[in-house]
Image: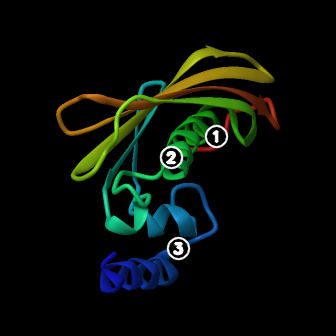
Amino acid sequence: MDENTARAAFEQALATYEQDFGKFFLARLFGLELSYGIDECRIDFELKDFMFNPQGGLHGGVIAFVLDISMGHLLHRTSGAGTTIEMKVQYLKAARAGRLSCTARFIRQGRSISFLRSELVDEQGELIAYATSTWKSLRTTAAPG
């Protein structure tokens, strides 16, 4: 692991984070870039070696983290705050370098319970992993903005 890269990412995250969606410390540490389309949330990020497991691939916990964030941010944008009730991750292929993209969409959006799916792909569009999840909305009115 390149310690200078890890330290620089940590220092940058400390200097720029806000306790807000898309700007919280871990999102900054991992360099997550969030964007929204119609009924979807996309996260793009560059792999860094401090994200890797001992076998040299992207750690499964990082994959689950990014999938969860994409779905949570989509729910927050459309329905307000929510919480994960359950999430299942399917790991299909190792990611070892480059830029990855994660896109979350609703399977079914309800007033209090919603079902979402998120897919993580590499630069060639190859599916790395996907998750399905169930979410509970903590309020039933749309979030501002």
Q: Residue 99 carries which label?
A: none
Residue 19 lies, with reference to residue 6, above or below; the image says: above
Secondary structure of the residue carrying numbered label 1:
helix
Compute the Cα span from label 1 to label 2.
24 Å
In the picture provided, is 58 more to the left or to the right than 74?
A: left
Secondary structure of the residue carrying numbered label 2:
helix
The 10 Å Cα crowd at callout 2, few under 14, some 14 to 19, many 20 or more, is: some
Residue 31 lies, with reference to residue 105, above or below; the image says: below
x, y (%) of residue 51? 42, 61
Query: What's under tag 2, amino acid-wise?
Result: Gly
Instruction: Please tell me in which quadrant of the rendered image residue 78 appears.
Output: top right
Residue at point 51% right, 56% down? 22
Count of marks, rendered view: 3
Compute the Cα span from label 3 to label 1.
19 Å
x, y (%) of residue 142? 68, 33
Which one is nearer the viewer's eye here, 2 or 115? 2
Callouts 1 and 2 close, C-beta under 8 Å = no
Q: Residue 76 carries which label?
A: 1
Residue at point 80% right, 23% down? 112
